[in-house]
């Protein structure tokens, strides 16, 4: 990579000093310093709720800071707005998506900056520009698709494309790979390398150590809204970073989960979904074991478990829960049959953002006798149970009366997880369980799964993160193009074998 000898002498691209931001009851940022150099990728690292997204919102002009100074390209900036930020080349990709669902990808890309002259929109030019940008990024994304018809991975690609339209001097990525798989992640990393060569500075938020290792020049660790330390990535170890982040030592390995497969609790025969995303699938999951499902984005793995829970229309085939055919699955009935589902998309699926965390976490228990007597909700019982569960998941801040909307992204995920802990269930479907949650919470989730299988539940984990699904599962199915192509267990369950089955099926698909 080229290095520019002038870089050392020019000041930092971004220089924040003493930035504070207070929300009602929470000091989200407490006199934080940060500088980002040109051509540098600077990782923000911290637990859920540490203040990473808030800091990014300050840098992008969304939240005005309560105090502190802000310099960009050597100039002091006051009263930054999102429009002004864009105009000077600060381009954010947020954790929660900002696209307008009813518009197409290209309409979203050009929203507010349409090409026009004399009041005439240059539609063709915009389409060409959008396509050229998407091609350059190497994303498999069609500019004319409506955003609400896109998968989460494709929405993420559109967000990234949108951020790169126009002149960018500082690109901000808040967990950009949370819903991308290996291939798109690879493309994104190539792009990042190109941007660095062009002297673009980057702020990057991630909970994934592998990524931090691959990308970071420097890492700034935040804890409880405070700047803890800024380190050179090359000379700091994973365990050092995690210790600075949490204030304690943590074992970074996946836990060993002893698994003893019992009777079949979920059985799927010739399942085909109405939209064709899953075709003729047969598989089963047993009590006392974790069944993994791996596959590339769009392979149908999420749709498969969503269908079992009743979120995707089934066109044919049979689902059996504990031996009994389960016809026309629907979420409410699924819970009654003992089936719980944890979605990957915590915003679109079921958090009432204006309501307290307590209510959100107990949504599924409202009909249980422990919580209601003669139809009257026993608030005390509810509060005690939910408090204990949220404490186990390390909710930050640990106040269950706050609105769910005031939580950081990872803490919203914990509320979703908390829901299923409040009730007796035997089948647990996890869709991308560790997306967006910090190292400590991840271990809590894995530990939770461990306790579930020990108690004799069947756990099904759909994950795009290969190391995770390989380490957790007792048996692993690999999906491709809506079908199950391989089942691996024991010594065959290796990264090479999973990748090989992706690959061989890619080839056959292309030849066919
Ligand atoms: N709009 C808001 N209103 C009130 N409190 C907020 C708001 N946004 C964030 N907070 C609080 O500010 C703190 C920092 O949140 P932030 O979203 O910056 O965390 P984060 O480091 O991005 O976490 P995560 O890894 O979970 O995304 C948290 O305590 C959060 O509850
Ligand atoms: Mg965040």
Image: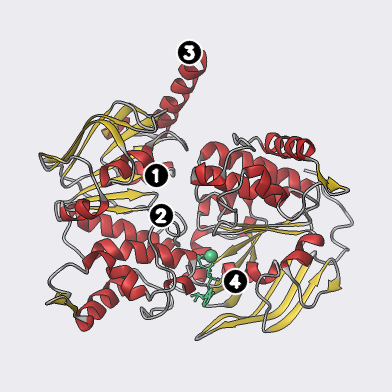
Q: Residues within 10 Å of mark 2 (few under 14, many from 20)?
A: many
The mark that comes first in sequence, 2 or 1, is 2
- Asked if the residue at tag 4 contacts the one at tag 2, i.e. Cβ–Cβ closer than 8 Å, the answer is no
Q: Is residue 222 visible?
A: yes
Label 3 – label 1 distance at C-alpha: 27 Å
Q: Is residue 46 above or below residue 343?
A: below
Q: Residues within 10 Å of mark 1 (few under 14, many from 20)?
A: many
Query: Residue 78 at what x, y percent from top left?
Result: 79, 78
For label 3, the SS is loop
The mark that comes first in sequence, 2 or 3, is 2
For label 1, the SS is loop
Question: Which of 301 and 254 lies nearest the eye of the viewer?
Answer: 301
Mark 2 C-beta closer than 8 Å to ligand 1? no
**Residue at figure coordinates x 27%, y 69% from the top left:** 362
Residue 239 is left or right of residue 133, and the answer is left
Which of the labelled discs sits on residue 512, or is there none?
A: 3
Q: Which residue in the protein does label 4 denote? A: 54
Q: Which residue in the protein does label 2 denote? A: 434
The image's colouring method is: secondary structure
Q: Is residue 180 visible?
A: no
For label 2, the SS is loop
**Residue at figure coordinates x 87%, y 63% from the top left:** 10
Mark 4 C-beta closer than 8 Å to ligand 1? yes
Question: Which of 315 and 216 lies nearest the eye of the viewer?
Answer: 315
- Asked if the residue at tag 1 contacts the one at tag 2, i.e. Cβ–Cβ closer than 8 Å, the answer is yes
The mark that comes first in sequence, 4 or 1, is 4
């Amino acid at each position: 990579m080229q290095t520019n000898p002038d870089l050392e002498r020019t000041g930092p691209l971004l220089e924040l000093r003493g930035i504070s931001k207070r929300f009602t009851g929470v000091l989200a940022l407490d006199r934080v310093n940060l500088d980002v150099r040109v051509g540098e990728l600077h990782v923000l690292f911290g637990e859920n709720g540490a203040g990473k997204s808030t800091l990014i919102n300050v840098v992008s002009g969304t939240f005005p800071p309560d105090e502190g100074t802000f310099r960009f390209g050597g100039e002091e900036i006051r009263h930054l707005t999102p429009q002004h930020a864009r105009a000077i080349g600060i381009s954010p990709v947020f954790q929660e998506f900002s696209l307008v669902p009813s518009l197409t990808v290209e309409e979203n890309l050009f929203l507010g900056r349409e090409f026009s002259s004399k009041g005439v929109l240059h539609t063709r030019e915009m389409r060409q520009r959008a396509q050229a940008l998407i091609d350059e990024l190497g994303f498999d994304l069609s500019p004319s698709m409506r955003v609400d018809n896109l998968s989460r991975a494709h929405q993420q690609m559109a967000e990234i494309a949108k951020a790169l339209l126009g002149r960018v001097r500082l690109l901000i990525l808040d967990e950009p790979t949370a819903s991308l798989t290996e291939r798109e992640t690879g493309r994104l990393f190539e792009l990042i390398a190109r941007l660095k060569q062009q002297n673009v500075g980057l702020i990057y938020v991630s909970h994934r150590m592998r990524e931090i290792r691959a990308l970071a020049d420097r890492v700034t660790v935040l804890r409880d809204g405070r700047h803890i330390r800024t380190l050179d990535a090359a000379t700091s170890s994973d365990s050092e970073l995690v210790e600075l982040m949490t204030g304690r030592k943590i074992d970074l390995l996946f836990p060993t989960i002893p698994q003893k497969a019992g009777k079949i609790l979920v059985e799927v025969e010739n399942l085909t979904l109405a939209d064709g995303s899953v075709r003729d699938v047969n598989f089963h999951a047993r009590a006392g074991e974790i069944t993994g499902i791996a596959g590339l984005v769009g392979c149908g793995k999420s749709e498969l478990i969503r269908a079992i829970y009743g979120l995707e229309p089934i066109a044919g085939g049979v689902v059996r829960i504990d031996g009994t055919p389960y016809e026309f699955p629907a979420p409410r009935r699924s819970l009654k049959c003992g089936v719980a589902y944890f979605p990957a998309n915590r915003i679109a699926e079921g958090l009432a953002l204006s309501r307290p965390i307590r209510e959100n976490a107990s949504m599924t228990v409202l009909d249980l006798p422990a919580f209601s007597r003669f139809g009257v909700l026993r608030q005390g019982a509810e509060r005690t149970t939910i408090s204990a569960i949220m404490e186990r998941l390390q909710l930050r801040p640990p106040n269950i009366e706050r609105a769910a909307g005031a939580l950081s992204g990872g803490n919203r995920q914990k509320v979703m997880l908390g829901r299923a802990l409040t009730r007796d269930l035997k089948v647990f479907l996890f869709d991308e369980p560790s997306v967006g949650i910090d190292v400590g919470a991840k271990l809590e989730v894995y530990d939770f799964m461990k306790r579930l299988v020990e108690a004799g539940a069947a756990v099904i984990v759909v994950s795009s993160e290969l190391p995770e699904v390989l380490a957790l599962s007792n048996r692993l199915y690999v999906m491709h193009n809506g079908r199950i192509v391989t089942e691996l267990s024991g010594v065959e369950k290796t990264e090479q074998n999973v990748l090989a089955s992706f690959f061989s099926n890619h080839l056959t698909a292309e030849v066919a």
